[in-house]
Image: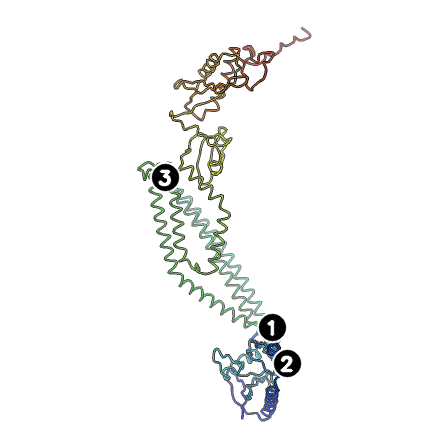
Amino acid sequence: MPGRWVSTGNDLVARPGPGRRASALILAALLAGLALTASAAPPPAQTGTTETAAATPPPATEATVRFFNRDILTLRSTLLGRPPELRARTAEANIEQVVQRPGTPTVAFENIPQGSLVLLGGQLVAMVTPADLDALNQQTMAQARAEIARNLTEAVRAAERDRAPRQLLNGVLMSLLATGVAALAMLVLLWLRRQIESRFQRWIEIRIRTLRQESTRHVVTSLRTFVNWFKRLVLWLLALLVLEEWLRFVFGQFGFTQPWSQRMTGWIVDLLAGWGQAIAGAVPGLVAAFVILFLARVLAKTLSLTFRAVQSGRFQLFGIDDQLAEPTRKLLVAVIWLFAVAMAYPYLPGAQTDAFRGLSVLVGLMISLGASSIVGQAAGGFTLLYARTMAVGDLVRIGEVDGVVLQIGLFTTRLRNLMGVEISIPNNVVLGGQLHNYSRNPDGPGLWLETGVTIGYDSPWRQVHRLLLDAAARTEKIQATPAPYVLQTALSDFYVEYKLRARILEPVLRPFVLTELHANIQDAFNEAGVQIMSPNYEADPEQPKMVGRAHWEGVPAPAQQPPSGS
């Protein structure tokens, strides 16, 4: 004869109950009869594969019976055509109806051949069959009854407590008190932040005033930045901890939200445990990555010291002079760090995960698409440096810009023109255009100036040569050795083209010397009565296009009229 199990706390006690036993037996007999009727019913005629497949019921899914925000039991089988989801919702409705009645109902069980009946306050609320048991964990019916009794008893007691006005008022008051304590803790954290900031700021200012070396001041400034970030991180963690504890305490004051409070505690513990395990597992890889990066730093420092010595002229290395020492150092240091990062990458925590690999691919794609012009400019910078087309201090002409080279950078070349304006030109533009270096000449320091005039065929060419050379001799900065000379570069339709070339020692003064030379050429030709036919012409003018000596200083001012009264 089956017995009845009554929940008393966490234990199940068998207790006889004749009246209820009879009703349970009658219910079991009805359920058994329905099951036998369903099994004895003749199968439908098999008219085809499609009808047979359509008549097969879909596989059952799990459904959990929940009451008062707590899991009671899990149903996994279909009973009398009722799927687990419908059985679970029916059980929840039955439990709610029983709990709404006066009194505190107790949990009991009735064993039947088909399984076990779950009784609450003497009322049937659910039925558990062997197919509902957790076969994966080899759960027995006794274990299932004990778990159901514990969960249902706890849920019923929590529901009864929350319905008491005194208990609800107590929970509200304790929540308000916890809110006040949390707000006070937040104010204390803000006060501590201000105190730490003021004291630390005063200490940093005193240290900076007492330090004289700029490098040491930079270290102190970096330390201040690091401490400020670390302080903010700690304060945020403390604020989050206060918020989490306040929320967990408030949830714990009410029966419906107590499971959330318990899950928060377990979540924090699991999170900290997961972090600890992850940190412990990542330590060997971090050590390996640190060793690789440390060796790369030592090698980079050694190369930097070596090439700075080459740059200072103390010795030479593989034919690298002082001009190529700095770009070579930057190039080798960049290669060292790229190889170091590539070697340390597999040892980084999470480097083998799909998320990390996807992020690496995304970053690489973004760099490859967005940095193509930057890479081209960097390659152009190294090309300019190693090709030695110009050097710092050279007077060059790039496109329409004349200036002195200030720096050949990795991405741009900086010039200062004769008006003192600093101009930056991308390296790929420098490589793609014409570069005139006025400071490079096979004859030594200085450069050759070139200017030209066009004179008609009626002027003797020997006279034109003499006049141009006389103008060059009058110009101060033009060197007598090597001597200036004149070239006839073209015999055009209406004139002869003459080019005067002269040498100066200071390339920076080129525009000023050209200005003086042009003025002297005009004076010399005006004195000789020779017309300068620039721009070209097709016929002789009626009057010679010259400036007489009387007008060299400008047109005289008209005579002033005497006053009318004189």
Residue 401 seen in the current view: yes
> Real-space Cα distance between discs 2 and 3?
89 Å
- Between 315 and 201, the one lying in front of the other is 315
- Between 41 and 367, the one lying in front of the other is 41
Select label 1 or label 2 by which is in front. Answer: 2
Residue 127 drawn at (x, y percent) = 57, 83
Select label 2 or label 3 by which is in front. Answer: 3
> Residue 436 — which label?
none
The answer to whether 326 appears left or right of 363 in the picture is left
Identify the amino acid type marked 3.
Answer: Ala
- Between 321 and 245, the one lying in front of the other is 321
| The C terminus, quarter of image | top right
> Residue 169 — which label?
1
Mark 3 highlights which residue? Answer: 325
Identify the amino acid type marked 1.
Answer: Leu
Q: Earlier in the sequence, mark 2 or mark 3?
A: 2
Q: Residue at x 56, y 67 (%)?
A: 177
> Real-space Cα distance between discs 1 and 2?
25 Å
Select label 1 or label 3 by which is in front. Answer: 3
Residue 21 drawn at (x, y percent) = 58, 91
* The image quarter in which residue 180 lies: bottom right
